[in-house]
Amino acid sequence: PDIDAQIDSRLAPDKPGRLDLLLSNTAERLIVEVKLGRGRDFPNRLREAVNQVSNYMNLSGIRQAILFGYVTPNNGKVFRQEKVPEGVDGRIVVISTEAPE
């Protein structure tokens, strides 16, 4: 399949924000955002990242996104959840490691 990958892509010349990765083909576009973190405050950072990606979706009109979160240290567990951003006809799939208790 012909997939175009753009790293650190601007949403638009006149709009703030850069996407970590934008994947696209002739029919679809997908935002991919990656967050790395340390410690117990990582869940808060992940929530902020969901808001950031929601904003990118609103600004760009892109309706699908994947948010990868990696916390160090982690307990080896990985969780997946779907978020439906308010005011956006789309979804964010969040895939993240979990910090130890």
Image: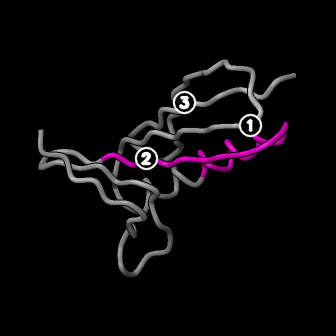
Q: Based on the picture, tell me whether residue 42 belongs to the magenta stretch.
A: yes
Q: How many labels does the image show?
A: 3
**Point 34% across, 51% down: residue:** 62
Residue type, label 3: Ile
Q: What SS does tag 2 mark?
A: strand
Q: Is residue 46 left or right of residue 101?
A: left
Q: Based on the picture, tell me whether residue 92 belongs to the magenta stretch.
A: no
**Point 19% across, 46% down: residue:** 3
Query: Which span is picked out in magenta?
Result: 30-51
Q: Residues within 10 Å of mark 2 (few under 14, many from 20)?
A: some
Residue placed furthest toward the bottom? 14
Q: Residue 72's mark? A: 1
Residue type, label 1: Thr
Q: Name the residue under label 3.
A: 95
Q: Distance between the residues labelled 1 and 2?
A: 20 Å
Q: Taking 9 as reference, is 63 above or below it? A: above
Whether residues under marks 1 and 2 lie with C-beta atoms below 8 angstroms apart, the answer is no
Colour convention of the picture: one colour
Q: Distance between the residues labelled 2 and 3?
A: 11 Å
Q: In this view, does 43 lie to the left or right of 96?
A: right
Q: Which of 15 and 6 is in front in this view?
A: 6
**Point 60% across, 50% down: residue:** 51
Q: Mark 2 points at which residue?
A: 32
Whether residues under marks 1 and 3 lie with C-beta atoms below 8 angstroms apart, the answer is no
Q: How crowded is mark 3: few (under 14 residues within 10 Å), some or many (20 or more)?
A: some
